[in-house]
Image (cartoon, rainbow, N blue to C red):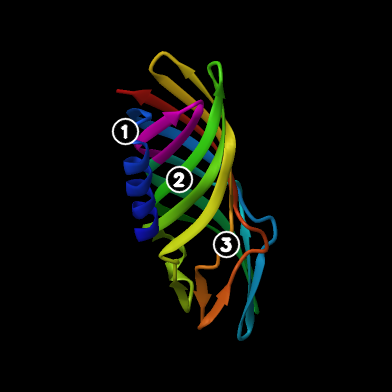
Amino acid sequence: MKRFIFFFLLAFTSFNSFAQIEFGIKTGLSSYDLAKDGIIINQGNQNIEWNIQNAGYGHHLGIYTRLSLLGIFVEPSLLFNSSKVNYDIKTYGESGVFNTIKSEKYNHMDIPVIAGFKLGVLRFQGGVVGHFFINSVSDVVDIKGYEQRFKNATYGWQAGTGLDIWKLRLDLMYEGNFDKYGDHITIGGNQYSFAETPSRLMLTLGYKF
């Protein structure tokens, strides 16, 4: 996180004397495209098959600043992001198959830094994002030997387009991440993860002060 804060300060001081600067708030929704492959866990005389039941959904809220110069802009944001996903868990044992649905909610502080250019009211943009873990609430904790070990920080990239109308700022962004989804799952001392890295589609509405 220190590196992102340093980037904010550097960008602000570099552009402050020359650029147009705006501040505002943002809020929006996101839909995750999570891993399609499940994981298999062996626990003595029983096996556990763990799958994503459906796409995860989330919402975000925060502040942003935009610094514009010669048709180019840099826009760092500070966003609280809360997401939820449902798991379909099947336990195969001597007494048969036991199926249950578990949910997990986790909160991050996201710091995206995007850059781009404008053509009329349209913006074309892309950049990097850091996700800094805050906490989680999970129904999965009752699985024997289950532990959560979320990374303090994960990173990804964003790209998309935006639209400026009066003081409104509308953004449609696609985000990819460099870490596998589910790598926080530890059972019996063994770490598991789903096969694919997570991505999400984000729709955000901002308001310029």
Q: Tag 2 or tag 3, which sits nearer the N-term? A: 2
Q: Nearer the viewer, residue 65 or 14?
A: 14
Q: Residue at 46% of width from left, 44% of height from top?
A: 113
Percent x, y of residue 57:
51, 43
Magenta region: 60-76
User: Where is mark 2, residue-wise?
Assistant: 112
- What amino acid type is highlighted by mark number 2? Pro
- Give the alpha-carbon distance from disc 1 to disc 2, as whole Å: 23 Å
On the image, which quarter does residue 91 sit in?
Answer: bottom right
Q: Residues within 10 Å of mark 1 (few under 14, many from 20)?
A: few
Q: In the displayed structure, would residue 148 be above or below residue 167?
A: below
Are discs 1 and 3 less than 8 Å apart at CB? no
Q: Is residue 2 left or right of residue 157?
A: left
| Figure quadrant of the C terminus | top left
Q: Residue at 59% of width from left, 34% of height from top?
A: 160
Percent x, y of residue 190:
55, 81
Q: Nearer the viewer, residue 113 or 196?
A: 113
- Give the alpha-carbon distance from disc 1 to disc 3, as whole Å: 38 Å
In front: label 1 or label 2? 1
Q: Residues within 10 Å of mark 3 (few under 14, many from 20)?
A: some
Secondary structure found at label 1? loop
User: Where is mark 1, residue-wise?
Assistant: 17
Secondary structure found at label 2? strand
Q: Residue at 55% of width from left, 60% of height from top?
A: 100
How many marks the image carries: the answer is 3
User: Where is mark 3, residue-wise?
Assistant: 179
- What amino acid type is highlighted by mark number 1? Ser
